[in-house]
């Protein structure tokens, strides 16, 4: 009885948070995509054709070029944080895939190392935020909340790996059940349940927060527009012509 | 130079991070717009009882019209990369002049009224009520931004505070809380045709004077044609070139270049202003109305080419926006870029050996170039990215023997604003302007000490007006600034053509 109540709560939580994340994220991104750009505003010097502009955006996403220009220490923290997070997520794919792909098996060890880098990077970013007067001034509850949430996710993850291991077959059964729709019991392991709850909180919070930078970065006109206004007339969709 | 009640930054040659002082520039407020100017622009002139609803409504509308605004309201992570990049923060030490903090003034209202999270959770997600105090804060700090885009270079998402400042000013205008300086100038363009309010005859008399002056000093006949129908080139330049020093020196430079090139050219008394303050207030309709005079000028003169004088924000609008606002330029000769910058034109002639330049004419100068913010980050010259940096430098180096660049963190795409751009070139903001000029002055001081630099070459009317005013406060004579084409005009050997 107790187990099935747990199952209901966590299954509902997973689907609820997942739906909020997917619908919310897509709704935001669609809004960005649909909002017009009346004028050409790339920050110059900029690539002079659309392919160049696409490379510029991808390069920003992969290497954080502008941040590198802006602040080397923040860049270092940002790179550590994002790549550690990415590797940890890739490692977690084994809970969603059946059978587990060979390449994902090959990523397991590096995923573990990344699992250690992640909370260190979070602490580093927190330290930067609180020790530089300028970032301290602009930081608010929302900024600390995200850092705390991700720190909690990372440390409960490590705790499961090295201190109180849940029965991994049950974990995979539960997660894979959610993915496949063939629901199974939730493992009644407190650390796992905490870890899972924090992740769902992050997902549900995501579309309403600054975490939307992940989708928004692709829509930033100063970066994704190319510099060719003299060669190709850009039309303002809500005011196409003089006198219109 | 009037005495001032505040400390002028001390020049050490280094740009130091200031210790922040909250509210340091919070009481520096520019004059509020007058009824006649606001009415002419189609704005109300005072706050109505329902100003708050109107402001939110306008804000919501802008979010559906500008992708930049919508995306930039959402995605800032407050990483802090921009916090030490703004000349107005570095100079005033007021933390609300940090780009992220400036944008936050708008974002907190966005969250409260225009996001689900903010409506429900309020202060927990940094959402705040729109009050008269908030509005006053907007008015103060969105008029301490010069829309120079320096912060956007360093932002991992390219968040452009210029877009945010324009939106804020647009909202303020729409509820009747505009700025006197900019609205007054736009009104002058509407009624007279240029920012300085010079009617055709007044421009003509400057041109006559210049012609005589050049004849007297050099013996050469250099023409300054106006309203000549069918001229090959229509030159559109900031009206300051017809009036102020050192601007006129550049106008003389353009005229000498045209003479040497053997090209017929003309100014237009109708299209007598390259500047377009419509951008400063972020209003598309006003910007287009101002730009439409250029289109009318083209229709009247019927030139083959459209060439643009030295001006920063004006070149951004001409290069990046004109084609959208008043294009396409089908009547012009497609062999040439439309519009073409005077520096592109002169550079091309120099490359082809069509100008004879005597560098020794500028031997008294050790020249350095201040890249204008809007040319550097909002436009281009030439056919390659970064031409806006190499072309003016190539020209300068062809006209003088001694050139030195300022510190790499203060030039090209990382250039600072002169401190007077974006609609803040008004006397009541002199403190902001002097302090905002501090980073540029430090970099200048450094090359002065190391290389004896004594001339800042400029390609912008606002830079010229701002620096001639501000330099003396820092202890330098105003004669230490001038246009790139001032140097060209001094070095050019008239008649000494070496074959085209």
Image (tube, helix red, strand yellow):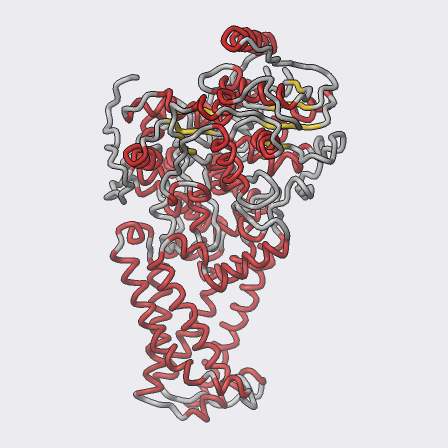
- Quadrant for residue B187, please give it: top right
Q: Position of residue B297 (x, y in %)?
A: 68, 22
Q: Residue furthest right?
A: B331
Above/below status of A59 relative to A200:
above
Q: Nearer the viewer, residue B244 or B116?
A: B244
Q: Position of residue A237 (x, y in %)?
A: 68, 44
Q: Position of residue B380 (x, y in %)?
A: 56, 40
Q: Quadrant of the N terminus of chain B?
A: top left
Above/below status of A180 relative to B77:
below
Q: Quadrant of the C terminus of chain B?
A: top right
Q: How many marks?
A: 0
- Judge from the rendering whether residue B396 lies leftward or rightward of residue B480; answer left or right: right
Q: Position of residue A6 (x, y in %)?
A: 43, 85
Above/below status of B202 relative to B417:
above
- Quadrant for residue A165, please give it: bottom left
- Quadrant for residue A131, please give it: bottom left
Q: Nearer the viewer, residue B395 or B175?
A: B395
The residue positioned 27% from the left and 37% from the top of the image is B13
Residue A38 appearing in the image: yes
Q: Nearer the viewer, residue B187 or B113?
A: B187
Residue B45 appearing in the image: no
The residue positioned 50% from the left and 14% from the top of the image is B243
């Amino acid at each position: 009885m107790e187990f099935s109540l747990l199952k209901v709560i966590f299954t509902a939580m997973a689907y609820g948070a997942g739906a909020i994340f997917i619908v919310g994220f897509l709704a935001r991104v669609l809004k960005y995509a649909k909002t017009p750009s009346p004028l050409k505003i790339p920050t110059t010097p900029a690539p002079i054709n659309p392919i160049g502009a696409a490379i510029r955006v991808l390069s920003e996403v992969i290497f954080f070029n502008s941040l590198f220009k802006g602040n080397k220490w923040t860049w270092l923290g940002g790179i550590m944080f994002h790549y550690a997070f990415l590797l940890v997520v890739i490692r977690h794919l084994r809970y969603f895939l059946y059978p587990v792909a060979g390449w994902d098996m090959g990523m397991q060890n590096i995923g573990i190392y990344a699992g250690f880098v992640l909370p260190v990077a979070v602490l580093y970013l927190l330290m930067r935020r609180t020790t530089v007067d300028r970032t301290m001034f602009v930081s608010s509850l929302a900024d600390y909340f995200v850092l705390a949430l991700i720190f909690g996710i990372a440390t409960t993850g490590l705790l499961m790996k090295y201190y109180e291991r849940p029965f991994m077959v049950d974990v995979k059964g539960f997660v894979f059940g959610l993915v496949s729709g063939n629901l199974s019991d939730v493992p009644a392991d407190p650390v796992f349940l905490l870890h899972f709850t924090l992740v769902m909180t992050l997902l549900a919070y995501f579309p309403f927060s600054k975490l939307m930078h992940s989708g928004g970065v692709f829509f930033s006109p100063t970066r994704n527009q190319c510099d060719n206004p003299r060669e190709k007339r850009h039309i303002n969709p809500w005011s196409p012509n003089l006198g219109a | 130079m009037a005495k001032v009640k505040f400390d002028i930054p001390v020049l050490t040659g280094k740009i130091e991070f200031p210790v922040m002082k909250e509210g340091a520039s919070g009481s520096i407020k520019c004059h509020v717009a007058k009824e006649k100017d606001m009415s002419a622009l189609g704005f109300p002139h005072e706050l109505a009882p329902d100003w708050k609803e109107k402001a939110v409504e306008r804000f919501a509308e802008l979010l559906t019209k500008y992708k930049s605004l919508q995306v930039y309201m959402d995605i800032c992570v407050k990483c802090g990369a921009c916090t030490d990049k703004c000349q107005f923060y570095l100079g005033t030490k007021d933390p609300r002049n940090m780009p992220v903090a400036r944008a936050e003034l708008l974002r907190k209202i966005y969250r409260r009224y225009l996001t689900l999270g903010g409506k429900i959770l309020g202060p927990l997600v940094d959402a705040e009520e729109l009050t008269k105090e908030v509005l006053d804060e907007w008015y103060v700090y969105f008029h301490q931004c010069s829309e120079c885009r320096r912060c956007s270079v360093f932002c991992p998402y390219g968040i452009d505070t210029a877009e945010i400042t324009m939106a804020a000013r647009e909202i303020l205008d729409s509820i009747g809380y505009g700025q006197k300086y900019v609205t007054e100038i736009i009104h002058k363009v509407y009624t007279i045709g240029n920012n300085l309010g010079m009617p055709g005859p007044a421009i003509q008399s400057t041109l006559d004077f210049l012609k005589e002056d050049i004849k007297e000093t050099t013996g050469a006949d250099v023409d300054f044609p106006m309203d000549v129908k069918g001229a090959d080139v229509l030159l559109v330049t900031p009206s300051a070139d017809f009036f102020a020093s050192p601007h006129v020196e550049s106008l003389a430079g353009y005229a000498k270049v045209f003479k040497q090139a053997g090209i017929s050219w003309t100014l237009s008394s109708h299209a007598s202003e390259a500047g377009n303050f419509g951008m400063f207030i972020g209003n598309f309709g006003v910007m287009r109305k101002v730009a439409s005079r250029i289109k009318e000028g083209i229709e009247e003169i019927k030139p083959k080419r459209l060439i643009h004088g030295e001006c920063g924000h004006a070149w951004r609008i001409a290069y990046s926006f004109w084609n959208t606002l008043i294009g396409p330029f089908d009547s012009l000769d497609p062999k040439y870029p439309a519009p073409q910058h005077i520096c592109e034109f002169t550079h091309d002639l120099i490359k082809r050996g069509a100008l004879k330049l005597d560098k020794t004419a500028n031997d008294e100068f050790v020249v350095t170039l201040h890249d204008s913010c809007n040319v550097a980050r909002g436009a281009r010259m030439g056919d390659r990215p970064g031409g806006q940096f190499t072309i003016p430098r190539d020209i300068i180096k062809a006209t003088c023997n001694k050139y030195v660049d300022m510190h790499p963190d203060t030039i090209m795409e990382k250039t600072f604003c002169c401190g007077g751009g974006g609609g803040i070139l008004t006397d009541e903001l002199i403190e902001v302007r002097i302090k905002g000029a501090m980073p540029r002055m430090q970099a200048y001081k450094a090359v002065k000490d190391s290389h004896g630099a004594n001339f800042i070459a400029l390609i912008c009317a606002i830079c010229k007006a701002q620096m001639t005013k501000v330099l003396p406060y820092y202890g330098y004579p105003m004669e230490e600034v001038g246009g790139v084409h001032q140097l060209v005009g001094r070095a050019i050997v008239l008649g000494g053509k070496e074959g085209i």
